[in-house]
Image (spheres, helix red, strand yellow):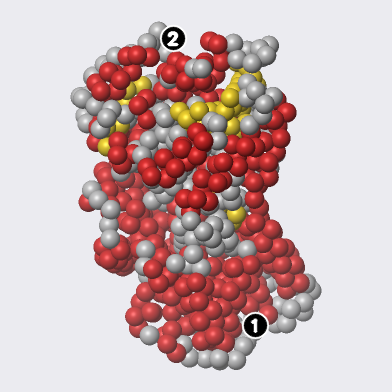
Amino acid sequence: MTDTSLAAVASPPRQSPGPAGPVGTSTAAPAAGPPRHRRDIEGLRAVAVLLVVAYHCGLPVVTGGYVGVDVFFVISGFLITGLLLREARDKGTVSIPRFYARRALRLLPASATVVVATLVAAALWLPPLRLGAILSDALHTTIYAMNYRLATVGTDYLQADAEPSPLQHFWSLAVEEQFYLVWPLLIILFVRRRGLGVVLGLLTAGSLAIAVWQTQENAGWAYFGAHTRAWELGVGALLAVTALRLPRWCVPAGLVAVAASAAVYTAQTPFPGYAALLPVLGTAAVIAGGTGRSAGLLGHPVLQTIGRLSYSWYLWHWPTLMIAPHALGRKLAVWENVLVALGALVLAALTYALVENPVRNLAALRNRPWRGLGVGLAISVLSAALCVAVVFTAHQLAGVTNFQAKVLNPATFQPEGLPAEIAAATRAPGVPANLTPTLAKATKDKPRYYREDCSGAFDDPEVKKPCAYGDLTSKTTVVLYGDSHAGHWFPALEAAAHQRHWKLVVVAKSACTAADGMIFLPQLKREFTECVQWRKDAWRYIRSLRPAKVLMSSTYPTLKLLGVTGNLDVEYVAAWQRSLRAVSTPGAEVYFMNDTPWLKASTPECLSEHMDDPMACGRERRSAIAEPARRKLVADAMRAGGATVIDPTPWFCTATDCPPIVGNTLVYRDQHHVTTAYSRLLAPQLGAALAAP
C-alpha cells in the first residue's frame, strides 16, 4: 500500500513492507514476497487520529493527545521505507519521479480540497482581517513549509494571543515531506552497499539529540522543526531496514505506552525532547510486535474504517473545529466540539470516496510518474490560485464605513479633553474611515525600540544597552523598566522625554515580568530562567545609571508565579516589593504603573467584524480590570515602599466602559497592547504624572 501514514496530523498552540535484511549487510532490502496488508497498522492509524481529534475537542482524559502526531511519524517511516526497499529489491534502484508522483496523487487532491474549502469558510465566518494570514498559510501548505511558518510565528511573543490558524495542522505534512526529500536519496546511495542501517541509525540518534537540546532552548522550533522530528520517522524506518520482530506482548505494552503519554502529558510538557520517546517507542513496539501476526483488537472493523479515513478526517477536523464557533457566534462546549468532529468525519468519508481514492488509483497517472507529477503540480497551482481568488473576492465585498472621526493630533491635543473624547467614543456610529493605525496595519504597530534590537529574544538573558532616547545630552535620566506592558508606554514616554528634555533609557524584555518571581513561558514550555537572569542584570544596570526617575510596569495581576507554597497574593506583593527595592537608588523617584485594561479579544479582528458597531469590541470597565483586589494590594504595597502609583484606567475608560477607538485613534493593537498612536496621544498625561512633585 502506498499510504503515507501521517498525511497530516497536527497539534495544539496535530502496506506493509516485508522483512528486511540485517543492518549493515549488502542485502538490506526486504525479502521476497508480496507486501501483506497490515490490519494492525490500519488500526494503529485510527488510534493516532482519535487521540489527536479528542485532544483538539478538549476531552480532559487526553491532555497529551497530540502524541498521535508521533505515532503517525513512526508508522510513516516504517511504511514508506518498506515501500522504497521493496522497489530497490525488485528493480535495483528507486525511481524518484515515481516515488514523488505516488505521494502527490496520495496527498494533494484531498489536501487541496480542504485548503480551498477552508478559505471559503474563513471568508464567510472568520473576521475579515484574518484572511490575509490564512491565505499566507494556504500558500505555505502548497510548498510544504507550514511548519517553519508556525515556528516563526510561535516564537513571536507579540503574536502569542493570535487565534490558531485553521490550516495549522498542515505542519506535520510539511515535516514528513521535508524528511522524504532526503531519505529516498540515501536509500539509493546505500541500499546496495554496506551501511544503510548504520547511516540511518546515526541520523536518527543525531536528530534525537538535537530535539532534546532544542526543546530546552526553543520549544517552538523544536516542536515544528523537521530536524527535531526526523528521528521519529527514522525509528520507523529502522524497523523496516532491520525487520525487527518483537514478542506479541509488546503490542499491548506499546499501546499502553502510547495511551499513558496521551493521558499524562499536557500542553506544558516540554515536547518533543525526552518525552517523545514514550509514544515513539511504544508505537515501534506495536509495529514490531505485530509483524506476521493477527491484528487482534486493532483489527476491529470500526478501527479499520477510521484508520482508512484517518488522513481525510485529520485534514477536516481542525478547520471545522476552528471555524464552527465563529459560524455559530459562540464558544462551543466539549460535547459540541465532539459533534463538530463527527461532522468532519462525514466530510472525510465523502472526500475519501469522491476525491482521495479515485485520483490515487487512476492507472493513467500511477503508471506514468511524470504525468502524475504534472497533475500534482497543477493541483497545487490551481489550489493556490483559487485561494487567492477567494480572498480577493472577500476583500472586494467587505463592508466599509464613510464615517470620519475627529482627528486627535498628539502635537495639538489638549489632555483635559481626553475624558470627553473617551465618552464620545462609546457612541461612535462605526469604525472611522480615517482610523490610525488602520486595522490592516495594527498588528505590526510596535514601538520602534523592537526594531532597534532593544528587546532581546526569549533565550537572551542580558540587557540590551544602551537603548537611549530623548535628549541624550540631558543630565536627567528616566528609565522605562518591565515587559511589553511597560514597552507600550515607550511612545508616550519618548515624546514626554523630548518635551521635558529627559534622557530615556529602555530596559525591557517581552514576557519577562518586572516582579521578582519565576514564571512559566508557554513559548519555551519551561521555567523562564532567562527572565530571572535578565532581571538581575537589569537591576544592576539601572542602579549604575543613577536615574532621576524609574517607571516600572508589567502585565499583571493574573500572571502566575511558580514555586509559591503560601498565599499567592502575599507572594505576589512580595515579588513586587523586592523589585521596588532593587531599582530604588538614592535620589531616584520610582513610579509604578498599574496595568492597562484588557479588552475581550483581538481588537483589530473584532472591529473588522463589527465595522458599524465598534463598542461590540469594547468592554465594561469592571471586567476589563482583572483581579481588582490583588491589584489594590500591589498598589498599596508599592506606595508603602515609596513608589508613586499611576493608574492609567481613566485614560482608557469612562466610569462604565472602555472603547476600542478614541477619536480616530485605535487604542489596542491586539487584546491588551496599546498602539503607538494612542500611547503617543497620552504623552501629556504621562509626562505630567512623572513631573508631579
Looking at this view, name the residue that lies furthest to the right: 194
Q: Residue 597 in the image: state x and y as whole percent.
A: 38, 35
- Residue in the image at 66% along x and 12% along y: 474
Q: Residue at x 37, y 25 (%)?
A: 651
Above or below residue 502? Residue 185 is below
Q: Nearer the viewer, residue 367 or 680?
A: 680
Please give the residue where the numbered disc 1 appears in the rendered image: 243
Distance (Cα) linking label 2 and label 1 = 75 Å
Q: Amino acid at mark 2?
A: Ala
* Residue occupying the point 27% across, 45% down: 125
Q: Is residue 503 visible?
A: yes
Quarter assignment of residue 632: top left
Query: Which mark is on residue 411?
Result: 2
Looking at the image, can residue 101 be seen? no
Residue 110: percent from the left, percent from the top? 39, 59
**x%, y% of residue 273?**
63, 63
